[in-house]
Image (tube, grey):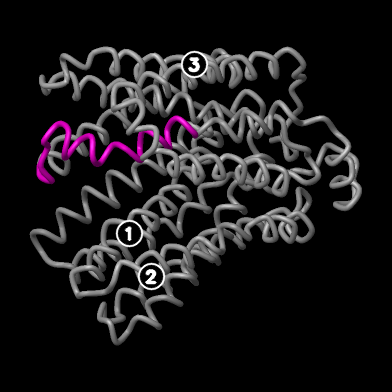
Amino acid sequence: MHRGRTGLFVGLGGLYLAQGVIAAFGSNVLLPQLAATGVTLDYQVELLTLGMVPWVLKLLWAVVLDLVFGPNSGTRRRTLLVSISLVCTLIALWLSLTPRTPEALASLTWLWVALNFAASVQDVTTDGLAVDLLEPEERGAGNTWMQVGTRMGQLGLGALLLATVTTHYGLDTAMAVWVGILGVCVLAPFMLPRQRLQAPANRPHTPVLTALLQLRTTPKYRIGALAGLAMVGSALTSAVAPTFLFQELGLTYNDYTYTLLPLMVVCTLLSGPVSHHLLTRVGVHRAFVAGTVAVGLVWAVFGLAEPLWSFRGTLLALVCVESVATVICFSALYGLLMAHTQPRIRAVHFTALMILVNLGRTVAPNFAPELLADLGYAGIWITCGIGQMLLAIPALLLARGYAPTQATNPS
């Protein structure tokens, strides 16, 4: 692999690793500790809701980034990423030194909101930079390592490592490890190749307002529909997964932490080279078709194999195959969304598409209890599997009219 390309992939993956670690900290460390100290469920929900506010508003950050840190801003974008990553680390350090007690709830709340604000700015900046710097043939591979970074941050470091450290060495040590990981991730932007950051834009300058008006009058219904529906099946299966694993199958917390989590981490690492090779070879459109069909087929077959659920090997096979197929599917999805963004407003447009992705992921779990009551676990797996496979149709339609454009800042 070309040295500059390797640095680009490692830098983007490291930035996404930080985001995954921050997200996992909230669900695996902060909320359980607050619950253990007697904080009410209502306040826990309020904390999660407030933490999501910066992510809802990140379209505003994207507009500012396109205006101030557009394709011609050179290495200033790397300086912004280093600065915002350092801010994340300092807020995390402050949060780690704040008592996790009911008396300190106000401080914890605003620190958590501030951390999510910084993380959302980093997210938008990283996405915009990826759209600029990744060539069409690199988008699949680049998004693969961004996906691997996210999943390793959430599962490997944020869940498995922090849970293990907390169990054996205590919460304070786990918090120190968390801050240390974020501190190391500050170095990730320095891996981005300088020659790409400084390369001149190869497209005529278009004012942001003009580009926004062009976007409004451009038919983007297929890509918008695909973005909105892409994560619905994943959100529904994830919503029912805890009760399915711990109540239906009778797994224990130790089974999940020390068997399933390590298996998911290993499969995620193995999926990286597989997804990189596949997406580079066939392109993001075909890879998404293959990935979404694979994920849907795995879910449907698992639902049909209900008589075999009592065998532990059935669940382990699902985890292995689904982990690899998921990385391929969603790496291709994000590469596909990047391929269909408007160059002048790449941060705004890609963020808008990601809002649609997250909207589907947010709304879908609300229907999980009713669907579970009507369909049962097997029915949900089968239904989500069929729906996921049908997403191949809009992807094929998008591929028919797609003409690849070069990165805004080619090397």
Q: Nearer the viewer, residue 371 or 320?
A: 371
State how far apart marks 2 and 1 are (Cα): 10 Å
Q: Label 2 amino acid? A: Ala
| Residue that carries the numbered disc 3 in the rendered image | 389
Q: Label 1 amino acid? A: Phe
From the viewer's perspective, is the residue at label 3 or at label 1 nearer? 3
Q: Earlier in the sequence, mark 2 or mark 1?
A: 1
Residue 405 at what x, y percent from top left?
76, 27
Write down the region rendered in magenta.
232-254
Q: Quadrant of residue 369?
A: top left
Circle 3 Cα neighbour tier, 10 Å, few/some/many (<14 / 14–19 / ≥20): many
Q: Are marks 2 and 1 in contact (CB under 8 Å)?
A: yes
Q: Residue at x 56, y 58 (%)?
A: 55
Residue 266 at what x, y percent from top left?
25, 31
Q: Is residue 26 left or right of residue 111?
A: left
Q: Quadrant of residue 352?
A: top right
Circle 1 Cα neighbour tier, 10 Å, few/some/many (<14 / 14–19 / ≥20): many
Q: Nearer the viewer, residue 409 or 42?
A: 42
Which residue is farthest front? 374
Q: Quadrant of residue 73?
A: bottom right
Q: Label 3 amino acid? A: Met
State how far apart marks 3 and 2 are (Cα): 40 Å
Q: Residue at x 51, y 44 (%)?
A: 363
| Residue that carries the numbered disc 2 in the rendered image | 92
> Does residue 27 sit above or below 47 in this rendering?
above
Q: Nearer the viewer, residue 97 or 246?
A: 246
| Residue that carries the numbered disc 1 in the rendered image | 25
Q: Is residue 250 magenta?
A: yes
Q: Is residue 201 magenta?
A: no
